[in-house]
Image (cartoon, grey):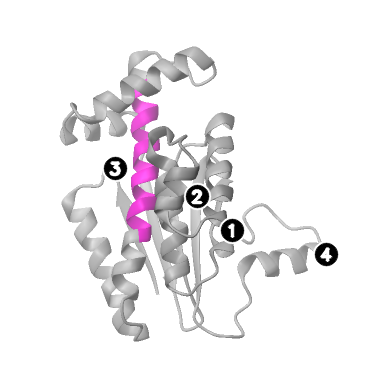
Amino acid sequence: MIQTFYIETLDSPSRDSIHQFCLNLETRFEKEGMGDTIYNVVQELINNAVKANLKRSFFNTNDYSFEDEHSYAAGLAAFKTSLRTISEEEWKKAVRDLGLRVTVEVDADEERILIYVENNAIMIPEEERRLRSHLARAMEVRNLVQFSEAYGDDTEGAGLGLALVIMLIKDMGFDPDYFRVFTRGDSTVARLEFPLKKDYVPIRKKWLDLKQSRPIADGEYD
């Protein structure tokens, strides 16, 4: 069963639809507490993806540059302020004008649950560097307080949000190493992988095994 949601900004109808779908997964697989926890993880990833698209819209409208270090820093500070002052409808119009949106795809069967959160914009090198750094740090700590105390660089709140994702995955008893962020075409994708069977072979292992035997086409094991 594959379910797809399309999101521009995280408004209430989108939030409620995704929450209900996650609760239905809990009922289907008879895993108490899974629904709310998966929803919280997905919601955090959606927040990050939506914010990335809003930032691109804001930079485009206000002529800030992603390539120039000083322009990027100034634009980021102005963007943070704008998040508190610009209405939901204004943001919707802005991202629509640029054709930006977030897609959430859930592919669930008896062996695993796969969730893809995709926004149709590629991370710039600095964004990717920060994300990889945040993920590596989140893997090292035991709780959010420890993460916050150890790592003060919380640009856009992404670091703490990713740490929360890792903690919630661990709390459900899943391996956070299965969580991946990668580019696919002109999009950035966050993939969640929740095995439901003991003999389940994760996507990355399939990819590595297949890579040893033959060339792999782009996107074959995303």
* Residue 193 point in image, percent of width and height: 51, 67
| Cα gap from disc 3 to disc 1, whole angstroms | 23 Å
Residue 50 colored in magenta in the image: yes
Q: CA distance from mark 4 to mark 1?
A: 17 Å
Residue extending farthest to the right is 213
Q: Residue at x 61, y 71 (%)?
A: 202
Upstream in sequence: badge 3 or badge 1: 3
Give the left or right position of residue 194, taking residue 61 as reference. Answer: right
Check disc 3 and report the residue beneath it: 8
Q: Which mark is residue 222?
A: 1
Please state if 52 lies on the left or on the right of 93 as rendered. Answer: right
How far, Cα to Cα, is label 2 from label 4?
25 Å
Q: Residue at x 58, y 44 (%)?
A: 132
* Residue 195 visible in the shown view: yes
**Residue 168 coordinates in the image, percent (x, y):** 41, 64
Q: Nearer the viewer, residue 78 or 120?
A: 78
- Asked whether the residues under the numbered discs 1 and 2 touch, taking CB atoms below 8 Å apart as contact, a structural biologist would say yes
The residue that disc 4 covers is 212
- Which quarter of the figure has residue 79? top left
Left-right relation of 118 to 129: left
